[in-house]
Amino acid sequence: MGGKQSCSFSNKEFNQVSVNQRRKSVIRDGQTRLSSAAERIRRHTTVHFGYSTLSLAMRGLDETPTELWELRELQKLNLSMNCLCCLPSALGALDNLVILNLWDNNLSSLPPEIGLLKKLRVLFACRNRLIEVPEELGSCTCLEVLSLANNQITGLPGSLATMQNLTKLNLSHNHIAHIPTCVYNLKGLVFLHLACNRLETIADQIQNLVNLKILIVEGNNIHTLPKTLCFLKSLELLNVDFNELQSVPVEMHLLSRLGRLACHPLDKGLHIVHNPLLKPIQEVLQGGLSALYNYLKPT
């Protein structure tokens, strides 16, 4: 997000903005203009791929300037790689935001007012200290990409089931023991990342995700895969590496788009290494995915 900026926003200048946060301009014709500090920040916005964009990434910020929330025209805001512990309720004033990047901060929560960002399509909140997600996030029904990876989340509110435009969801590296029920209602999902959590099972409702192409659940404690998983005919990448699988469903041969056994993390196919697979499945897999499918197919 952000791209190359045409002008830099120095830490010295930013600190000057923060010192003058409460300075306001005079009222003319009955309307209050933007404060001089807000205008100074505004000069550092750029137009990137047609979007009004502001990047305050890597500024060492432990709080945001009050005047930032006056820039209601902003569509892309990058606050990544700072030291932010919280965001003010004024975040909700930026109701034209399409992309919000909060990656790599110290956020322990998101304000409920985030639900006022009705145009938001992409939210990166990974690498923070989030324990939960506010119910109000479910009001962001235009969201297409949501990354909450590398936090301390144990579940999601049921309100997120309304996000029918969501296509990519990253919940990896959290403390999730059960796939949240709302996830099974997100029928538009194409990409679902749940690696390195505390999962032991996948519910039969996984079959609801009929558009799913990529499912990553490596690094969990999953003992069995439901046969309903094998009804996801669009699935092109299934990563179950580093789990506790001893066998696979006989219906797995229905997943024809997997194509092959895969090794590289980005390769399409079936990733199934580092599982305590029993014979004869373990031996059959030495012949590749086609050998496994031939073994599983009913005679």
Image: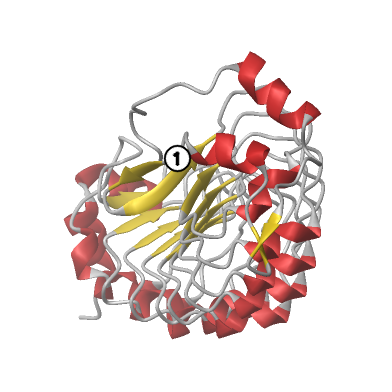
Drawn side of residue 211 relative to residue 27, left or right: left
Query: Residue at the spot x=55%, y=75% of the render?
Result: 118
Q: On screen, 248 above or below 228? A: above
Q: Residue at x 64, y 77 (%)?
A: 138
Q: Quadrant of the N terminus?
A: top left
Which residue reaches farthest front? 29
Q: Is residue 108 visible?
A: yes
Q: Residue furthest top?
A: 12
> Going by the image, does 82 lie left or right of 239?
right
Q: Residue at x 30, y 35 (%)?
A: 264
Judge whether residue 221 can be spotted in this image. no
Q: Quarter of the image containing the C terminus?
A: bottom left
Residue denoted by label 1: 45
Q: List x then y, in percent, for residue 179.
A: 64, 68
Q: Residue type at mark 1?
A: Thr
Rendered residue at 65%/14% (across/down):
12
Q: Secondary structure at mark 1?
A: loop
